[in-house]
Amino acid sequence: MGVVVKKSSSVVVRPSELVMTDNTAIKLSSFDKGLKGSDHIVVRADNGEVHIQCTGEGVEFVEASVDCALKVANLLEPLPAARAVLDELALYYPAEGCYAPTNPLMMMQVTEFSCGGFVVGVTWNHGTTDGCGMAQFLQAVGKIARGQPAPSVVPIRWDDALPSLPSSIIEMQQLRVSLEPLDLACLDINPVKRDQPHQGWIPGSPCTMFEVVAAVLWRCRTRATMSKPESPVVLWFAANVRKHVGAKEGYYGNGSTGQLVMAASGMVTNGDIMDLIKMIKQAKDRIPDKFTRGWSC
């Protein structure tokens, strides 16, 4: 018998105390403007700048329960049963998607398991923050929930020190978030990581899980679509650039941009997988150059 997941209808949880917001407007940076949905979550000032309107209305909340223990669910294991539970637990916006003008900026769900353990899930409009920013924001919320009077790092939504992104970069980011995500099979990357010491790898510079997965997917995609071995093929990936642009500690808005890796199709499909990983690592190392030598991909 499968796991049973029950969910309540969403309700708006308002602040426990009256919040005087006077309709404060928080400006969005160019990192935010490059993401789909920013035009639906904001008001526009007379000078054309984009803002989030603070109304103090609260957060949309869903309560859920699962009839098994958290340990039994094995949510982090790459197993079909765990994936099925995650699909049931996932919190989604209505069918029209998270960028509809009537949808909230963020929805939160707390799921309680039979053992007393619980999981907190959120979904949000990408125009407000990225994954790194949301993780930082939730850490601050968690510390307050545990009784701390204030988080150790105060959340900051607007950072006037952030640079302005060129229009070409903004357009590329808008294209990225317009792509539909695909279900991916589980990849066993352990053999690749075990081979590192035998492939002339740079001492003290092991590859990361991201680099291995990106290299394998790049190769698989190229093999499936390659027309001519000499044709160029591009890998594009997002990168957290907060430390490179001097973002303030606590900044939880969008802080990511993209990086490109280019190679001939024949090299990607038939070359050594370690060479692809090295190319990805080198591309990551070049990210700071965007902010010191001018913008380019």
Image (cartoon, rainbow, N blue to C red):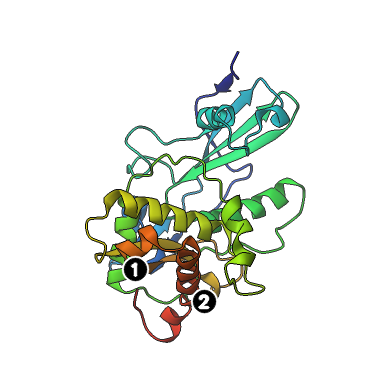
Vertical arrangement, residue 47 with respect to residue 112, above or below:
below
Label 1's element?
strand
Amino acid marked by disc 1: Ala
Q: How far is disc 1 from disc 2 in space, using C-alphas? A: 26 Å
The residue carrying pointer 2 sits among few (fewer than 14), some (14 to 19) or many (20 or more) residues within 10 Å by Cα, namely some
Identify the residue under disc 2.
244
**Residue 18 x %, y %:** 59, 46
Query: In the visual, does 28 lie left or right of 170?
Result: right
- Residue most extreme to the bottom: 293
Image point (73%, 32%), residue name: 117
Residue toward you, 143 or 237: 237
Image point (59%, 71%), residue name: 201
Identify the residue under disc 1.
263
Amino acid marked by disc 2: His
Label 2's element?
helix
Quadrant of the image containing the C terminus: bottom left
